[in-house]
Image (spheres, helix red, strand yellow):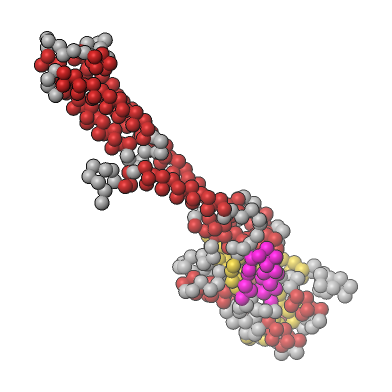
Amino acid sequence: MAAEGSPPFYRSTAFKVGVAALILAGIGTLVSRIDTSKNLKKLQARMLSGAPEGNYYALVTRMAALAEKQQGKIENVSSAGSVDNLKRLVAAREGACDAHFGLIQEGQDWPEKPKLETLGRLPRAESVFFLGKDANQLKELASIAKMRIGIGPPASGTEKIARQIFESRDLAPLALVLSNHTLAEQLDLLSKGQLDLGVFVMDRDGPLIDRAIREHGLQIAGFAHAEVLAGKVPHLSLGRIEAGHYDPVKVLPPEDKPVLQISTLVVGNGCASRSATVGMLSVLDATFPDFLRFNKATANTSGLELAGAAKSFYENEGPDPFDEYAPWLVDIMPPGKWVYLVTALSILFNIMGFGNRFQLWRIDASRVKTDAQLMAVFGQSVTIGDIARMEPPKERRAEIVQGVRDVMKELEVLAAKSRKQSLSILVPMGGELAYRYQESLMFESMTVLRAFLERCGAA
């Protein structure tokens, strides 16, 4: 228990020294954890891709290899496709967060809760291929009436797009027979003639498409007025496959083919840390050299909010210094908020400093006021030194003694106030010395006045 009259511990110099030591230790720890080597150690994420034989899976495999070179890890998780990826990202967000990112075709029905976010879109859109053994002959939509058409795996983006096209009111009279198959199975059925057409949604240079045309002899159906189909399905646009793109010697395809196209989004569910998100963006930028430029110049029309880390990444044209050298720090709080915090602390310390100087000014002004009161009692030219040597007056003794006592009472109150203020935790280290100086002047005056009263016999 503290001795009676001693200040509380939190007002003591020892406490202030301890707080200062903790702050210095914290700063030292922060500095020691700054990593000047550029790596992706903080990137530890699971990414939903697609079927193992599809382009999404091959893309994420390539991204994982790039991340591994910089000590990062992207686990490639196969799936049934975009719709399945969306469901699994939502389930992970509401559950154990066992998935962090996914490749999803644009135009999905995004859930209101939990909120998903987009990191951006791949700079190269995917193409919607209609492949078949005699697909070069298919020029008009009417020519596919009653055909057997494979529309990819269930819960895939391919199935969603295919049904949006073929089950529309305009195409209902064609009486098409739609069926679900894995990509490999669909390719085999097309080769055997057990399917008339197959829908594939992937990169124009994907290995499966190249193999289907070169090795299996499948052809691309190029429908006239394909732009009308694109206009009826949200987020579809019109593209073109040039003649000879897959084999310039045999000229495959034999003529330019109009194809539908759709963008691919990189979607996160908020399970990944900011540093992992920035790491994923860095890998995407390394995988697609124009990824950053493309997304910076392209409006976000996905229907999803752009991730905060992605906004910063595009604005700074890469990771900012905090993200690059102190990723663990931005995981606690984004860089922008750290700036606000530092600014707020700076303002707080300035206010504290102003308040401390104001209190000191008031104490000094009050002490000077007591000097003026002494001059009123003893005369304008009398100093405290003069009073120390002064003999008790014979005239006005009672009046002078009362005036001295009044001044001493004010000095006692003022000294107590100065001591209390000097022990405040809000006074910066070293600031208490100014209060100590004021106290010493007050104590000196009180000592002289007390001696004067004793000489007057009025102590």
Residue 4 or residue 30, whichever sits in front: 4
Image quadrant where residue 319 sits: bottom right
The residue located at (26%, 10%) in the rendering is 381
The secondary structure that most of the magenta stretch takes on is helix
The residue located at (67%, 74%) in the rendering is 57
Residue extending farthest left: 398
Magenta residue span: 54-77
Q: Is residue 132 left or right of residue 32?
A: right
* Residue 86 seen from this side: no
Q: Position of residue 400 (x, y in %)?
A: 15, 16
Q: Is residue 75 magenta?
A: yes
Q: Is residue 381 left or right of residue 254?
A: left
The residue located at (33%, 47%) in the rendering is 10
The correct choice, above or below, for 9 with respect to 193 in the image is above
The correct choice, above or below, for 440 with respect to 401 in the image is below
Residue 450 or residue 404, whichever sits in front: 450
Q: Position of residue 316 (x, y in %)?
A: 62, 50
Residue 454 or residue 273, whichever sits in front: 454
Q: Is residue 7 magenta?
A: no
The residue located at (12%, 10%) in the rendering is 394
Image quadrant where residue 237 sits: bottom right
